[in-house]
Image (cartoon, helix red, strand yellow):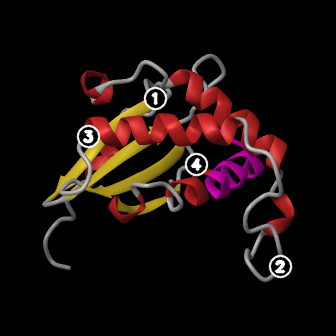
Amino acid sequence: MSEPLQRIASFTVDHTKLRPGLYLSRVDGDIVTFDLRFKRPNTGDLLTNSELHSAEHLIATLLRNSPEKDAVIYFGPMGCQTGFYFLFDSRRLSNMEAIELLKRVFAAAGTFTGEMPGKSVEECGNYVNLDVETGRTICQWYADLIADWDVEKLRYE
């Protein structure tokens, strides 16, 4: 590449000031990306691998089993381990509907009972660090955090 590389949008978020929450990251045509940030405010601690992975299995499963599943494009962890990306089709789901969906699935994950979805050698390449109680705990924490979230709060500070 002969031209200088452009700084990507996610690198413009000041991670020293990052607060846990739900934020609008990008709009690419009909595809909307929300950043679900989990970095702990007092300690700055990131999620552990088990917390990140366990929450991801619960939330991805609940999203893809929701009535809005056809609007869900992707849910998965950020490489920097500060949270997750949620991509959805804005033709099928408004920003407020997406927020309500996330509130609902995180609350459901916080009280999830049963076996951890995808916890087997056949279903997951790193199934050994999955723990349903760990996933429930982190999902309930996040459900409480976003309980009063609305479209006005989607902006990064």
> Does residue 52 belong to the magenta stretch?
yes
On the rendered structure, is 1 left or right of 150? left
| Precedes in sequence: disc 3 or disc 1 | 1
Secondary element at tag 1? strand
How far from the left and from the top, in percent, is residue 83? 53, 44
Q: Nearer the viewer, residue 113 or 13?
A: 113
Find residue 21 and name its label: 1
Q: Is residue 118 above or below residue 94?
A: below
Three-letter code for the amino acid on which mark 2 is drawn: Val
Task: Quadrant for residue 35, please give it.
Answer: top left
Instruction: Write down the residue under mark 4.
Output: 81
Secondary element at tag 2? loop
Q: CA distance from mark 1 to mark 4?
A: 14 Å
Task: Bin the neighbour count of mark 1 within 10 Å (Cα to Cα): few under 14, some 14-19, many 20 and up.
Answer: some
Find residue 155 and name its label: none
Residues shaded magenta: 45-58
| Precedes in sequence: disc 3 or disc 2 | 3
Instruction: Write down the residue under mark 3.
Output: 95
Three-letter code for the amino acid on which mark 4 is drawn: Gln
In this view of the protein, can residue 13 be seen by the observer? no
Q: CA distance from mark 3 to mark 1?
A: 15 Å
- Please state, as top left, top right, bottom left or bottom right, where the N terminus lies in the image: bottom left
On the rendered structure, is 95 left or right of 73? left
Instruction: Write down the residue under mark 2.
Output: 121
How far from the left and from the top, in percent, is residue 115? 83, 57
How far from the left and from the top, in percent, is residue 5? 22, 64
Q: CA distance from mark 3 to mark 4?
A: 24 Å
On the rendered structure, is 13 left or right of 45? left
Task: Quadrant for residue 43, please give it.
Answer: top right
In this view of the protein, can residue 98 be seen by the observer? yes
